[in-house]
C-alpha cells in the first residue's frame, strides 16, 4: 500500500497534562524519534509476526499547551509528509480546570470515499469531522490549547473499529492472494497478517490518518472486531470452538487488538504494569525484540481465562470520570452465572462507580438502556433460551438470539440489574456526592438516540448512543428496528417477558431524542448549562467527495436538575 518506511500512524493515543503517547507501524526494524519543540524522544521498534511497531512516550510537556511534532525513522523525517495539505500534527495537553470535550461513536467500515462507496455505506462521519477540524486549525493562529473549541480532548471509539467477519472488496482481494477463500473461514479473517492489513485499510485514509495523529484516542472492542455475536451465549461459544479456524481467529484478534487499540489506552503507569509491555520496555539488547510468541500466548490466555487480564479502563478529566467497560471478553457464559462482566470485572467496576465528580460517564459498546420494546424482547429471549419454556423453546430461542443479535445488557438481566443498582446508588448520593449526570455512552445498534431514566431527584441518568460512524442499516431493517423498539410493540414484548418469568424493570426510562439512522459522530462538552450533546454527519457539496462537509444533525443539553 505504501513504499514509505512509515506504514501506519503516527497515532496520538493517551494524553494527559504532561505526557503523550505516539504509536506507529514501520516497514522494517528501526529507531523512531518524535520531536516536539526543542525536545526529542527516541525508541527502538519491537516486532510481532514480522511487523514492526513503536510507541513513543513524550513527557515533561507543559499543561494546557499545543505542541506540533515531527516523526523520524532512522533519522529521516517521515511525518508530516512533505506533500500533505493538512495542518501540522499536534499534541494538545490537558489543562487543569478546563471542562472536558470529547467525541464518541462506533461501527465504521473501510470502503472507498467515492460515489460508489458512499452509495453503499454512506459518507464517513469521521472523515467529515477530520476535514472540519483541519479547516478550524488552519484558521487558528494562537497556540493556546483551547483556541479551537471543536478540537476534542478525546475521541472514544466504542467498538467495531474493524470488521473481521464482514470484509470489503479490498480485504477479500488481499485474503485471496494468501489462501483459498472457498475454505473456512472464507472471506473472514484467519490470522494476524490479515488483521494487520485490515487495520491498515481502516486507518490509512489521508484525512482520517491526519485526524488520528492530532486528536487523542481511546478504544474498546465490540463483536465485529472479532466476530458477530462474540460471546453471545455458551452455545455460541461451543459452536465456535468446534470449527477449525476459531482458535486462530480469537488469538489473532486479541493479539492485534492489544497492539493496535488497547496499548494506547493505558496511562504510563498502567502500561508499566502490562506483562507484554514490560518485555518490550525491559529489553536492552541492540536488536529489536520479537514478542510474537509471548503476545499470542497472552491472547490465548485472555480468551480462555478472562479474569487473567482487564481490558476495561478508567480516566479522570478534572471533574469528570470516564469508565470504559469491556462488555465482550469479560463475559460469564455459564447459564447459572450468566453475566456481561464476570466477578473480577464487577469488583473493579464497583470500585470505579462513585460520586464526587460533576459527571460520571460510562462507555460501553452495547447500550445499557435500549428502547423499551427491544429491552423486553431481549429479556424474554434470554429467559426462554435458558429454559423458561422448556428445551424445545430454548433451542428456538437460541437461534433467535443469534439471528437477531439479542445479546445486549438487557439479555443479561443479572448484569443489567446490578449495573442499574450501581447507577442509582451513585445518582442518589449513596456513593459520595451525587454528580449532575450518570451518562452511558454506547454504539453498536446502528441508530442513535438519547434516553433518560424517569427520576424526580438526584442525578439525571442518561443513555446517549452514536452508531454508526459509517455502516448504515438498510431501509427495510430500519423500519423493522423502529417497529420492534418503539410504540405498541413495547407493550407486547413486556407481556412476553413477564410470561417467561422476567422481573419488572428496576426503573422506567423514556426516549428524549431520536432515533436517527444517519452515519454520525457524537460529541459532548461539559458546560456551565450542563452536559451538551450533539451529533455530526457529513454531506457532499459540489461533488467534492474528498472533502465532505460536516453538518450538525441533533443537539441537546442535559441541564442540572435544579436549572431545567
Image (cartoon, rainbow, N blue to C red):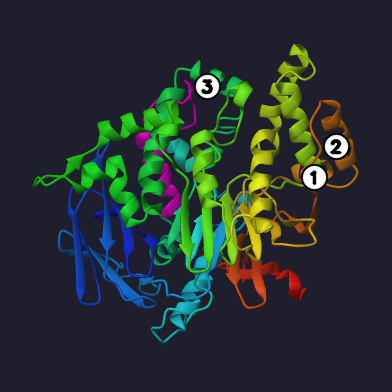
Q: Secondary structure at mark 1?
A: helix
Q: Quadrant of the C terminus?
A: bottom right
Q: Secondary structure at mark 2?
A: helix
Reading the image, the residue beneath label 2 is 494
Horizontal side, residue 221 vs residue 266: left or right = right
Q: Percent position (x, y) of residue 349?
A: 53, 46
Horizontal side, residue 522 vs residue 253: left or right = right
Quick one: which residue is furthest to the top in this view? 391
Q: Which mark is residue 276?
A: none
Mark whose residue sits in front, 3 or 1: 1
Q: Percent position (x, y) of residue 189?
A: 45, 32
Q: Specify few, some or many for label 1: CA neighbours under 10 Å numbering under 14, 14-19, or 20 or more.
A: many
Measured along the vertical axis of the image, is residue 394 above or below residue 2? above
Q: Kindly check if marks 2 and 1 are in contact, taking CB atoms under 8 A apart as contact.
A: yes
**Span colored in magenta:** 174-203
Measured along the vertical axis of the image, is residue 535 above or below residue 145? above
- Asked where in the image residue 96 lies, by quadrant, the reply is bottom left
Residue 188 is covered by the magenta coloring:
yes
Q: Specify few, some or many for label 2: CA neighbours under 10 Å numbering under 14, 14-19, or 20 or more.
A: many
Residue 413 is covered by the magenta coloring:
no
Q: Specify few, some or many for label 3: CA neighbours under 10 Å numbering under 14, 14-19, or 20 or more.
A: some
- Asked where in the image residue 310 lies, by quadrant, the reply is top left
Asked whether residue 480 appears in the rendered view, the answer is no
Reading the image, the residue beneath label 1 is 372
Callout count? 3
Q: Residue at x 56, y 64 (%)?
A: 357
Q: Secondary structure at mark 3?
A: helix
Nearer the observer, 232 or 189: 232
Mark whose residue sits in front, 3 or 2: 2
Q: Kindly check if marks 3 and 1 are in contact, taking CB atoms under 8 A apart as contact.
A: no
Amino acid at each position: 500500500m505504501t513504499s514509505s518506511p512509515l506504514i501506519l500512524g503516527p497515532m496520538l493515543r493517551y494524553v494527559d497534562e504532561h505526557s503523550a503517547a505516539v504509536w506507529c507501524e514501520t516497514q522494517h526494524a528501526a529507531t523512531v524519534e518524535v520531536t516536539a519543540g526543542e525536545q526529542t524522544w527516541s525508541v527502538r521498534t519491537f516486532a510481532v509476526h514480522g511487523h514492526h511497531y513503536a510507541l513513543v512516550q513524550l513527557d515533561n510537556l507543559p499543561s494546557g499547551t499545543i505542541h506540533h511534532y515531527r516523526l523520524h525513522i532512522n533519522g529521516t523525517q517521515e511525518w508530516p509528509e512533505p506533500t500533505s495539505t493538512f495542518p501540522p500534527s499536534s499534541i494538545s495537553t490537558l489543562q487543569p480546570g478546563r471542562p472536558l470535550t470529547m467525541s464518541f461513536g462506533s461501527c465504521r467500515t473501510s470502503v472507498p470515499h467515492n460515489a460508489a462507496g458512499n452509495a453503499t455505506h454512506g459518507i464517513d462521519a469521521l472523515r467529515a469531522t477530520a476535514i472540519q477540524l483541519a479547516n478550524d486549525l488552519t484558521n487558528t493562529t494562537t497556540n493556546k490549547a483551547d483556541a479551537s473549541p471543536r478540537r476534542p480532548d478525546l475521541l472514544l471509539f466504542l467498538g467495531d473499529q474493524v470488521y473481521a467477519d464482514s470484509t470489503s472488496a479490498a480485504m477479500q482481494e488481499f485474503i485471496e492472494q494468501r489462501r483459498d477463500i472457498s475454505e473456512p473461514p472464507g472471506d473472514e479473517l484467519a490470522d494476524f497478517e490479515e488483521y494487520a492489513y485490515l487495520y491498515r485499510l481502516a486507518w490509512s485514509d489521508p484525512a482520517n490518518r491526519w485526524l488520528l495523529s492530532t486528536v487523542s484516542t481511546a478504544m474498546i472492542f465490540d463483536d465485529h472486531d472479532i466476530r458477530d455475536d462474540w460471546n453471545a451465549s455458551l452455545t455460541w461459544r461451543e459452536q465456535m470452538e468446534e470449527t477449525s479456524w476459531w482458535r486462530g481467529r480469537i488469538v489473532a484478534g486479541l493479539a492485534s487488538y492489544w497492539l493496535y487499540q488497547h496499548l494506547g489506552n493505558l496511562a504510563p503507569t498502567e502500561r508499566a504494569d502490562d506483562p507484554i509491555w514490560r518485555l518490550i520496555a525491559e529489553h536492552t539488547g541492540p536488536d529489536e525484540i520479537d514478542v510474537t510468541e509471548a503476545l499470542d500466548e497472552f491472547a490465548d490466555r485472555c480468551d480462555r481465562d478472562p479474569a487473567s487480564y482487564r481490558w476495561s479502563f478508567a480516566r479522570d478529566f478534572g471533574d469528570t470520570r470516564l469508565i470504559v467497560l469491556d462488555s465482550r471478553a469479560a463475559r460469564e457464559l455459564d447459564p447459572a452465572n450468566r453475566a456481561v462482566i464476570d466477578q473480577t470485572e464487577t469488583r473493579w467496576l464497583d470500585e470505579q462507580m462513585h460520586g464526587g465528580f460533576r459527571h460520571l460517564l460510562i462507555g460501553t459498546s452495547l447500550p445499557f438502556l435500549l428502547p423499551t420494546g427491544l429491552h423486553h424482547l431481549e429479556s424474554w429471549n434470554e429467559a426462554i433460551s435458558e429454559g423458561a419454556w422448556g428445551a424445545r423453546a430454548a433451542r428456538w430461542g437460541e437461534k433467535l438470539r443469534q439471528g437477531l443479535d439479542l445479546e445486549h445488557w438487557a439479555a443479561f438481566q443479572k448484569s443489567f440489574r446490578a449495573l442499574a443498582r450501581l447507577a442509582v446508588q451513585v445518582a442518589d448520593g449513596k456513593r459520595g456526592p451525587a454528580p449532575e449526570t450518570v451518562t452511558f455512552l454506547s454504539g453498536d445498534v446502528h441508530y442513535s438516540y438519547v434516553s433518560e431514566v424517569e427520576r424526580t431527584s438526584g442525578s439525571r441518568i442518561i443513555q446517549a448512543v452514536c452508531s454508526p460512524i459509517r455502516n448504515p442499516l438498510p431501509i427495510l431493517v430500519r423500519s423493522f428496528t423502529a417497529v420492534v423498539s418503539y410504540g405498541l410493540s413495547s407493550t407486547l414484548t413486556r407481556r412476553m417477558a413477564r410470561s417467561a418469568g422476567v422481573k419488572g424493570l428496576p426503573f422506567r426510562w423514556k426516549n428524549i431524542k431520536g432515533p436517527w439512522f444517519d452515519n454520525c459522530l457524537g460529541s459532548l462538552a461539559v458546560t456551565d448549562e450542563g452536559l451538551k450533546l450533539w451529533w455530526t454527519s457529513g454531506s457532499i457539496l459540489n461533488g467534492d467527495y474528498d472533502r465532505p462537509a460536516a453538518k450538525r444533525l441533533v443537539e441537546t443539553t442535559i441541564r442540572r436538575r435544579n436549572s431545567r
